[in-house]
């Protein structure tokens, strides 16, 4: 086993172990995410260098310098593809299922329990995260019938204040 082959093999084992540790403890060091120079891209770059260098050493008769340059090029290309086609979409796809009552203001809901003029009914609001059911009262103390669309105007003490929705068109 040549010296460069040992470097690639030990590098592959060492970076692999560090990658496993990073996966296990990534939440603890989550603040280190600095764009393209985050730990995931750096570790993957080094791992690809070691893996491609070791494979090229085993499969070709090339000179060690050519293998190092080829491993750097292969690693750069693979890391670029990993970052822009996997890591960036994953980072932007993070969606929270949390909502606040204030964030529902201005949404359109549907009455499932009729709202009397002096009491409470119930509405449902369809969001990307599912259907939310909430207690509701008429904003101007008006009565709203079953299955009518309503606009959420305000939120007061656990109750949505709604008006019957009338589209402009």
Image: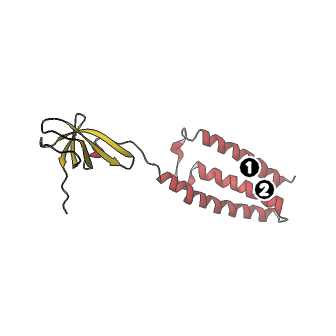
Number of other residues with Cα within 10 Å of mark 2, as a class: few under 14, some 14 to 19, many 20 or more: many
In the rendered image, the vertical position of residue 141 relative to residue 69, given as above or below: above
Identify the residue at horizontal 52%, vertical 48% (top origin): 33
Q: Where is residue 158? Give x, y as percent.
A: 25, 35
The numbered mark at residue 150 is none
Colour setting: secondary structure
Asked whether the viewer can see residue 67, the reply is yes
Identify the residue at horizontal 52%, vertical 52% (top origin): 90
Residue at the outermost right position: 1
Q: Where is residue 106? Give x, y as percent.
A: 25, 50
Q: Where is residue 78? Give x, y as percent.
A: 64, 60
Q: Horizontal placement of 125 versus 57: left or right? A: left
Residue at the outermost top position: 157
Residue position marked by numbered label 2 in the rendering: 54
Residue position marked by numbered label 1 in the rendering: 12
Seen from the viewer's position, the closer of residues 37 and 21 is: 21
Residues at marks 2 and 1 touching, judged by CB atoms closer than 8 Å: yes
Seen from the viewer's position, the closer of residues 19 and 37 is: 19
Q: Quadrant of residue 45?
A: bottom right
């Amino acid at each position: 086993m040549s010296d460069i082959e040992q470097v690639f093999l030990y590098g592959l084992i060492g970076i692999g172990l560090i990658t496993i540790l990073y996966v296990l403890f990534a939440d603890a060091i989550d603040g280190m995410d600095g764009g393209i120079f985050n730990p995931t891209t750096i570790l993957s770059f080094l791992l690809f260098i070691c893996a491609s260098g070791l494979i090229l050493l085993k499969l070709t008769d090339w000179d060690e310098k050519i293998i190092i340059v080829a491993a750097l090029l292969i690693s750069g290309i693979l890391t670029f593809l990993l970052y822009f086609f996997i890591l960036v979409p994953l980072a932007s796809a993070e969606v929270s299922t949390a909502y606040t009552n204030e964030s529902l203001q201005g949404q359109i809901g549907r009455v499932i329990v009729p709202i009397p003029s002096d009491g409470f009914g119930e509405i449902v609001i369809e969001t990307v995260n599912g259907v939310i059911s909430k207690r509701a009262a008429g904003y101007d103390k008006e009565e709203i019938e079953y299955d009518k669309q309503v606009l959420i105007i305000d939120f007061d003490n656990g109750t949505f204040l709604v008006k019957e929705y009338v589209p402009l068109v």
